Image (spheres, grey):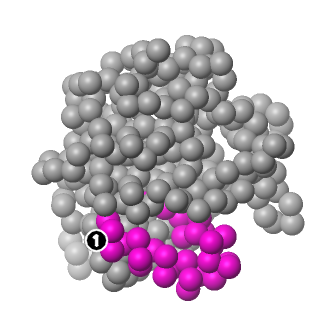
Amino acid sequence: MPATVLQPARAEPPAFLSIGHITRDVLPDGSFALGGTVTFATLTVERLGLPAALVTCASPDICQQLPSLLPGIGLAARMAATTTTFENRYQDGFRIQYLRARSEPLEIEDVPHPWRAAPIVLLAPLAQELTPEIVALFPRGEGRILAATPQGWLRRWDSDGRVWPTPWEAAEQVLPHLDALILSHDDLLPFANGSRAEAEAILRRWSQLVPLLVATAGREGATLFRAGLAQHFPAYPAREVDPTGAGDVFAAAFLVQLARSGDPVAAVDFANCVASFSVEDVGTRGIPSPTQVEKRLAQRRGPEAG
């Protein structure tokens, strides 16, 4: 049964559409927080002033809560037996991630027809829930930005639910259909023998297949790749409290500014600024307002830019 619209978008079509699993993230005390790229990304876009919507799949109890947890955001969800659930454990400074439950894969039919015309679309898989064929639903063209955060295509899990890296076998099939790919530099380290130089070689190769590729590196900033050429952008100083979702916030902010300005350089700097706020509070509470962002951008430009 296709997804049901739980909450209409503020505009038809919404300015921004994200597709992927929302998640229940297990916290150290055993409680849960709402997570997932679609959650952080759509909240960021709404905070920045554009109408946003998401398509997901989750259990009925979570679906019932979504309109109050994500006010103002268009919501379409397919009811499933369970909600994708992640648990992170830390050992000797390293994160060990477990997939405790996985919802059903999403299908093309789950995307409401009016939303398919959204000018910005973000494919945001977390647990292999999107097939490569979904890119065919959003043909590239003037007035549209089709992007992906491939984290969920780079994961597999064993019988205990422990998450391991896996190569993105469909990369060469998907990338030519995208306008932008946004990912963490560290996502590729397992396939590069831990070498940042080898990871960068993969990024350069992929950037020959997609117009824009952005690799984030936390406090080290972000790198924009175009046709194999790299341009680095420093991060904004931040007092880190919780890095959860910062990459998702970055991706959404980058796409918003790219759509507004058409300038990927300005979009990376803008996204770095927005993401710097997101790490300064817990969960989605750090996502800033446009006024906060403009003030921090102006501080970096300095008085001579005024």
Residue that carries the numbered disc 1 in the rendered image: 265
Q: Amino acid at mark 1?
A: Val
Q: Is residue 196 magenta?
A: yes
Secondary structure category for the residue under label 1: helix
- Where residue 168 appears, x then y in whole percent? 53, 59
Residue farthest to the bottom? 197
Residue 272 lies in the magenta stretch: no
Q: Based on the displayed image, in which of its 4 quarters is residue 228 positioned?
A: bottom left
Total labels: the figure holds 1
Residue at horizontal 34 percent and vertical 45 percent from the top: 135
Identify the magenta region. Answer: 182-210
Is residue 65 in view from this perspective? no
Q: Which one is in front, 28 or 296?
A: 28
Depth check, front residue: 145 or 243: 145
Picture residue at 53% right of the left edge, 26% below the top: 57
**Residue farthest to the right, as pictured:** 92
Q: Residue at x 73, y 41 (%)?
A: 99
Q: Nearer the viewer, residue 169 or 84?
A: 169
Number of residues whose C-alpha sits closer than 10 Å to that of mark 1, classed few (under 14), some (14–19) or many (20 or more): some
> Residue 264: x percent and y percent?
27, 66
The residue lying at 26 percent from left, 32 percent from top is 116
Q: Is residue 275 above or below residue 216?
A: above
Query: Considering only vertical position in the picture, is 168 above or below 110?
Result: below
Where residue 225 sits in the image (x, y, percent)? 36, 75
Q: Quadrant of residue 199?
A: bottom right
Q: Characterize the magenta stretch by its predominant secondary structure.
A: helix
